[in-house]
Amino acid sequence: MQENKFKKLRIIFDKIYDNINFDYFVKYDPIQIPHLFKNKKDIETISLFTAILSWGRRSIIINKCYEIIKIMNYQPYNFVMQHSNKDLSLFKNFRHRTFNHIDIVNIIKSLKYFYTLHNSIEDIFLKKKILI
């Protein structure tokens, strides 16, 4: 029964993917952000931030994601895993709609904790349960 639901979801997501998987769409959409990276952990780390910020005007979302990437020295996963309190203070002026520096710092700390317990975000979804 559960497996049938996953198959139906897969069909829906594949159709959505087919509608947005072309260069013109990617060029003007926040989905371009994860495409900047090659390393799987960088991709999933920045994808999470991109997803969290993805409400509002796409151009603003993209600019805010680039702001995060720049603060993280273009290494999102390494930043999450090796940040210091001084590094986190670089976000003190970060804002996006109702999202502020406290939110981003808490997400960074939570991601670090998560990655110390699990190899990747993808692995958790493949296991179909979260063990935190």
Image: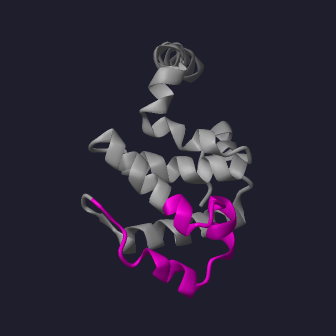
Q: Is residue 40 magenta?
A: no
Q: Residue at x 49, y 12 (%)?
A: 15
Residue at screen point 68% across, 75% down: 82
Magenta-colored stretch includes residue 86:
yes
Coloration mode: one colour
Would you place residue 7 above or below residue 87 in this image? Answer: above
**Residue closest to the eye, 70 or 124:** 70
Q: Position of residue 106 (x, y in %)?
A: 46, 71
Question: Height in image: 113 above or below 60?
Answer: below
What residue lies at 58% left-to-right and 63% top-to-bottom? 111
Task: Examine the image and state in which quarter residue 36 appears.
Answer: top right
Q: Is residue 27 left or right of residue 45?
A: left
Relative side of 52 to 18, left or right = left
Residue 92 left/right relative to 71 = left
Front position in the image: 9 or 4: 9
Q: Main secondary structure of the magenta part?
A: helix
Residue 7 percent across, percent down from the top left: 57, 16
Tally of numbered discs: 0
On the rendered structure, is 93 left or right of 27? Answer: left
Decide: is 96 above or below 106.
above
Q: Position of residue 54 (x, y in %)?
A: 37, 45
What residue lies at 37% left-to-right and 69% top-to-bottom?
94
Which corner quadrant of the image does residue 55 belong to?
top left
Where residue 10 sits: x, y (%)? 55, 18
Q: Which residues are magenta?
A: 68-96
Q: Nearer the viewer, residue 14 or 125?
A: 14
Q: Quadrant of the N terminus?
A: top right
The quadrant of the rendering that contains the C terminus is bottom right
